[in-house]
Image: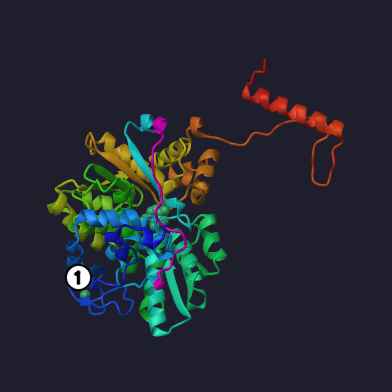
Amino acid sequence: MKPELFPDDLRSSILPEPGGDLRYDCLKCGGSFPPDALHYVCPECGGLLLLEDHAEGRLRERDGAWWRRLFDYRLMSNDQALRGVFCYHEFLAPIIPLEDVVYLGEAHTPAVKAPPPLEREVGASFFVKLDGLNPSASFKDRGMAAALSFVKYLARVGGRTGIMAVCASTGDTSAAAALYSASLGGTVKAAVLLPRGYVTPQQLSQPLGAGAGVFELPGVFDDCMKVVEKLSEDYDVVLLNSKNPWRVLGQESYAFEVAQQFDWETGDLMLFVPVGNAGNITAVLGGLMKLRRAGVIDRLPRVTAVQSVRANPVFNYYRSPPEARSYEPVKVRPSVAQAAMIGDPVSFPRLARLAALYEEERGPGSFQAVEVTEQEIMDSMILANRSGLTVCTQGGESLAGLRAALAQGLIAPGETAVLDSTAHALKFMEFQNAYFRGDLAGDYGVRSRPENVNSPREVDLPGIALPAQGKVLTPEERAVFTDRAARAIADALGLKPRA
Ligand SMILES: *Cc1c(COP(=O)(O)O)cnc(C)c1O
Ligand SMILES: [Zn+2]
């Protein structure tokens, strides 16, 4: 819709001007630093940073109803800078001018109501937010859009080119980092560090295809993360892991979209989020509290973190009552929820801080954690995809989390679950195919349920001429082939001839 057609009270606000007072706030020493450079850790004490808008009070100069209308109308703008996460510019990264916004088609993914047969099978009414429908096929694009927009802005203002951006990855961060860096031509080049054998072939192809430097290292993600942290300490590189607080800001858009997709009525929702490095769950909690403070939503939803029993440091922390909690990294074991296979989540201090604030505001039990088995993850992924959805193993983990919450009575009658399917099914087909082949028993302890297994069937046509490369069938041969093949398939399917 053209700007002049927006309602009078919104027209001049549809295209936002830079504003706000974003600052890096240190979670450890309480220091606060201006956003005139890229920091990943506190320049004074090395602590973890969050970006906070010190002028957030200005958002309350408008009431919640005005913001809700603005964001609803803004969805109709065709301005590229507002099509993605910057639809929520004032709440997300208000210092970035629209001219620097990098948009590659991310965000505004659908929240799809589970098809009725799936709801009946699970025993609950729920929605799945298909974040695999982002350009690099995972939610990481949200954070990367914000981080690379800031890099682009800094590069323009500082006249810099040839910036090297690096990340460690369980597969999806590197795909997103490579894609968004590639869109900036010579300004930014990406190099990604991957744990050898722990990313899928699709995930490995993505940064290669985007022209990034790709390095495979022995070990698991946590080992790669240490190397990339060392690189960012000793060399002039841009770190694109979610340790970079700009990533977390971009991922807050997930929370804003859920609120908007439920007409800003979030009080009876329960969000399920698979947790690895804990960047995404931090963003979800932070984004929701921001909306609440500005009166855009009245009541916070409840939020459940989901982890595999094989990579469960966050669940372990929250399984104890508040006074008995202590954080211990875990040694991960192979998990089909491979993108979340992290034993020492970098954002844990952020999560602990925000989850405590969340519970202060919304009450005890408004943030909770559940753990699920590898078997439950695979069976849930396959069930969802046999029911009309396209979820990855981590989406299966979210669904397994909902089933665990139902079984444990952790979800109240009248609450509606919203599951984060964090990547596209196609990135994780390796696991589905291994399940079908019966190959997940050894490393993952997953048994293939026969009723879930599917495989292609050969059509056996002995004694006739068959089509082949470089061979032309005569009309008679073609008629015989078509007839026999159709009959063989009809027999296999038990079809009845037309009367
Ligand atoms: C990164 C990732 C996760 C875990 O998110 P964190 O922010 O690391 O907790 C979950 N699912 C997928 C598909 C991912 O790529
Ligand atoms: Zn500090």
Secondary structure beneath disc 1?
A: loop
Is 103 inside the magenta-drawn segment?
A: yes
Residue drawn at (30%, 55%), measured in percent from left and top?
256
Q: Quadrant of ligand 2?
A: bottom left
Where are the magenta residues, as a range?
Answer: 99-118
Residue drawn at (28%, 58%), measured in percent from left and top?
282
Instruction: Find residue 283 and report its horizontal and vertical position in percent.
Output: 29, 59
Residue at far bottom of view:
159
Residue drawn at (32%, 37%), measured in percent from left and top?
403
The vertical placement of 351 against 43, above or below, is: above
Evaluate whether residue 275 shows in this view: no
Q: How many marks?
A: 1
Near mark 1 (Cα within 10 A), the count class, few <14, some 14-19 or many ≥20, is few
User: As shown in the figure, which amino acid type bears the numbered disc 1?
Assistant: Ala
Instruction: Find residue 430 and report its horizontal and vertical position in percent.
Output: 52, 48
Which one is nearer the viewer's eye here, 83 or 249? 83
User: Which residue is tagged 1?
Assistant: 55
Which one is nearer the viewer's eye here, 70 or 256? 70
Instruction: Find residue 485 and report its horizontal and vertical position in percent.
Output: 73, 29
Is 83 inside the magenta-drawn segment?
A: no
Q: Quadrant of the N terminus?
A: bottom left
Q: How are the colours assigned in the image? A: rainbow
